[in-house]
Amino acid sequence: MAILNIITYPDKFLTQVVKPVANIDGALQEIVEDMIQTMYHAPGIGLAAIQVGVDQGIIVYDISPKEPGQTLNVLINPKITHGEGSIVSEGEGCLSVPDFTSDVKRFEKIQVEGLDRHGKPVCLEADGMMAIMLQHEIDHLNGKLFIDRVSQLKRELYKRRRLKQLKNE
Ligand code: NI
């Protein structure tokens, strides 16, 4: 297992639409294990493969990471098949977007289909915090960051601040 480097904005790698995972094999399990370790280490409540340089449809998440492992989940090739209602995700943030949070409009309830880490089809319904996190992570697989869902002005201001920050690093 290894802690992987998390790619950050404005790296263009994050804007790719990922490829679906084709083989549920040992290599996949290794990526999943590394992603889990990287997420807990960050710490974060969710992580998409694209954030660690893997352009495949994999997300790992644990929205109550106080007891690591208990509420951990992995989804392969997840897709939102239904969304309803509207909720404001307050102060949303992302490991790939350092030092920035913003309110984001999200579906209140969603239905997601995908595979578990062993390739078994899963269909789940989520609302509240879980629905927000899943929409955020699935956005990553479509090359989208949460800052793409805030006003252009806010995004531009952040971009300027971020570029300055990177120059000084
Ligand atoms: Ni994120």
Image (cartoon, rainbow, N blue to C red):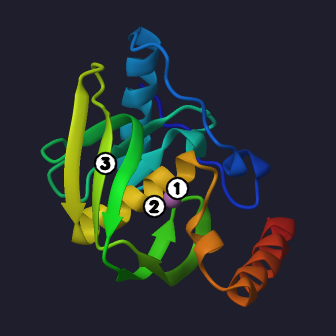
- For mark 2, give the secondary structure: helix
Q: Any atom of ligand 1 within 8 Å of the CB at mark 3?
A: no
**Image quarter hosting the N terminus:** top left
- Badge nearest the viewer, 3 or 2: 3
Pointer 2 with pointer 1, Cβ within 8 A: yes
Would you call the spot at circle 3 few (<14 residues within 10 Å), some (14-19), or many (20 or more)? Answer: many
Give the side of residue 142 with respect to residue 34, left or right. Answer: right
Q: Residue at x 64, y 70 (%)?
A: 148
The residue wearing badge 1 is 139
The residue wearing badge 2 is 136
| Name of the residue lying farthest toward the bottom | 153
Expressed as whole percent of the image width and height from the top left, the position of residue 3 reads 48, 37
- Which mark is first along the chain, 2 or 3? 3
Amino acid on which the number 2 mark rests in the picture: His
Q: Any atom of ligand 1 within 8 Å of the CB at mark 1?
A: yes
Amino acid on which the number 3 mark rests in the picture: Val
Expressed as whole percent of the image width and height from the top left, the position of residue 44 reads 39, 57
Would you call the spot at circle 2 few (<14 residues within 10 Å), some (14-19), or many (20 or more)? Answer: many
